[in-house]
Amino acid sequence: MSYRGRAKKFLKSQNISIGDIISVKKDDAEYRGMLLDRAEDADELHIVLKMDSGYNVGIALNGSEVKLLEKGDKPEINLPPLDIQRDPEKMDEANISGKAIMNILSENMKPEFWVQSARAVADEITEGADGVVVAHGTDTMHYTAAALSFILETPVPIIITGAQRSSDRPSSDAFINLMSSVAMAKSDIAEVTVCMHATENDNQAHIHRGTRVRKMHTSRRDTFNSINSPPLARVKDGRVKIIDKTFTPRKRGECQLEVNDSLEEKVGFIKSYPGIAAELMDYHIDKGYRGILMEGTGLGHCPDHLIPSLERAADEEILVVMTSQCLYGRTNLNVYSTGRKILSSGVISVGDMLPETAYVKLVWALGQTNQLEEVKTIMQTNLKGEMDEKSSSKYFLRDYGE
Amino acid sequence: MSYRGRAKKFLKSQNISIGDIISVKKDDAEYRGMLLDRAEDADELHIVLKMDSGYNVGIALNGSEVKLLEKGDKPEINLPPLDIQRDPEKMDEANISGKAIMNILSENMKPEFWVQSARAVADEITEGADGVVVAHGTDTMHYTAAALSFILETPVPIIITGAQRSSDRPSSDAFINLMSSVAMAKSDIAEVTVCMHATENDNQAHIHRGTRVRKMHTSRRDTFNSINSPPLARVKDGRVKIIDKTFTPRKRGECQLEVNDSLEEKVGFIKSYPGIAAELMDYHIDKGYRGILMEGTGLGHCPDHLIPSLERAADEEILVVMTSQCLYGRTNLNVYSTGRKILSSGVISVGDMLPETAYVKLVWALGQTNQLEEVKTIMQTNLKGEMDEKSSSKYFLRDYGE
């Protein structure tokens, strides 16, 4: 096994091997799970357990009472994502406390859970937390990051992190992400951000604005990327270095904590495609949806034959918001005749905002007011770094203009 | 103006300036339009017209009869995309003939137009064309490229190209793309490919497999990118250089021309998102859709509460195909419990195939046979380089492993 030094010696003395089921008592908590292998470059003070609930925790041996419950085989690597809770791995370093908010797979997240998460985070801040790290499954991490960005006005850093599967080193991915999140939580940047691997190497993480980030790969550790902007910062060796010098983040203590968690769940999400039927739009209107996020083609287009349904949506005070399925770049509906017809039908477009972020923002904006014009203004105003007046075409794929 | 040498001298002699409306007679064709500025690095033998129909053509002055119709102002740059037709710009070089197939904006493309385009291309091949270049608007170029890939078995190269807007050099984008397409059309690679700018510089183009390419930026010239594979080739100075050495393209003459153009238009395209309602799936079932392409989260997930509707779809012989909205990477529904439940409900997943390509393939596959099991086999078999058994995680963003 790859455990070294004190951890190796201790495990050997207890006849505990990787794959064994053990219990670990530490402070008031008791953890039960399978001992996992450790990252090669990890310290010799922690062990990693795979819990029954599916997530992994790292626990410092110092002050822990460890008991072998059952000998096991070396496990196949098949790790579920971290669920929403804070990982106790870094308890020793920074006076950290952990709490499980909910235990669901992230693909099952929905707007009501955003509210629960936001309230739990707010409770921690009210109780004096200097920063909050939220562990989250990666499938929908970016949707939740955008949701917390809009729901919370925060005087402290809020960082969402997690782990991608890694077939050779089960825990290392989570470990660096969490270490880097804690470093960010101690910084002066009071924004909702996502902290995940910067590259395939296990030595640095990127900090992304919660409204600019997207999961771009099914399995790589560096799956999360800022779109239309560079990452906000890089964390290496515990130090946070700003990359995006054009963005002025809110500073610690600059605002009071606020929780604006009224949401409108009846929001549709339609991607335009060749062959799309106008009746799909009508379906959403008939079903009482109050908003529709559209992922158009190119500069923000959909086929001409949808226009009567777009007009009907406008007549019934249903707001249709246009983004682009290109993901990079910005909508511009004034260039071509189709775009101008779409605009005339009452659709608004939101420039370089990501479709997923715009969907979350629409769910939130429709919850903030019943006045359609106010919703339009909210959608077209930059609130949390989610859009930019200027063209951002220089940031494309991994060209951050560094 | 930037016209040089013979072109400059000729235009001056005729008192023709940029922005003037002119007519050009050449061979049997007459072109009427506004004289546009020329790329700085272009030759001195061609002029560029913006036609009433919205697209630009480059015409060799040699053998042309040019007449000034109306003096105009230097135009604002506001060019619509090229429509589906071949550009006569390169007539002098390679014995090229041009034909307009249809004149629609690419956002209005739909499956029946894929069939028209495929038949028109096939007619050219039957009549002896050694290669076919199709000019196409960029919004849905990748959908059409995938469609022609599946519909046609081709003994010659078929290249789809177009132009992104360029505010400083109206014609240069189209010019290099077209030059490079013609070079590719003369090559031995009998595949359906997309040829567009490789970088922001105006000196080289990438050749992408028609089933691997996606528009990734609303406005940049290098908007088209191969996903999960490197581009097939690069064209510079008229020379085609293979980049993707793992892919074995079909060679010229290797197969007979075939047109398999039976399609099933009742195919839905659903993106999973937090807040998605199961009734959206039911709507597609009730409306008689025969297939549904789903863009899941992460490895190919959707919320648990959709599963009864997925089972209902399977009961009614409606095929649901899972891809990932991450775009990069590959679906794997065996990793987590949600994925396994989705698989058990009858959904199939298609690895590293792009969602847009998988949608087009599903439209095509459902047209080829009424046997559901055969459709599943078709969807999970690599036919035109659209999927790969091996992991393709090393190709991410612009890391082509070169």
Image (spheres, coloured by chain):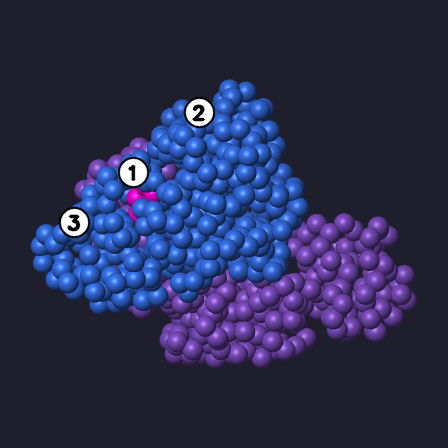
Chain colours: A blue, B purple
Q: Residue at x 16, y 64 (%)?
A: A12
Say which amino acid is labelled 1: Ala
Amino acid found under the numbered disc labelled 2: Ser
| Frontmost residue, A314 versus A191 | A191
Of marks 3 and 2, which one's residue comes earlier in the chain? 3
> In the rendered structure, which disc, 3 or 1, sits on the residue that comes first in sequence?
3
Residue picked out by circle 2: A262
Residue B192 counted in the magenta span: no
Q: Quadrant of residue B361?
A: bottom left
Is A382 located above or below residue B28 in the figure?
Answer: above
The range drawn in magenta is A82-87
Chain that bears disc 1: A
Magenta portion: prevailing SS class: loop
Which residue lies at the image location 54% right of the left edge and 74% below the top edge? B234
Question: Residue A248: which disc?
Answer: none
Label 1, residues with CA under 10 Å away: few <14, some 14-19, many ≥20 = few
Residue ID at (33%, 62%): A42
Residue B132 in the image, given as x and y percentages of width and height = 53, 69
Give above or below for B30 relative to B246: above
| Residue bearing mark 1 | A100
Disc 2 element: loop
- Marks 3 and 2, how far apart at CA: 42 Å
As drawn, which residue projects farthest toward the front?
Answer: A63
Cα distance in 3D space between marks 3 and 1: 19 Å
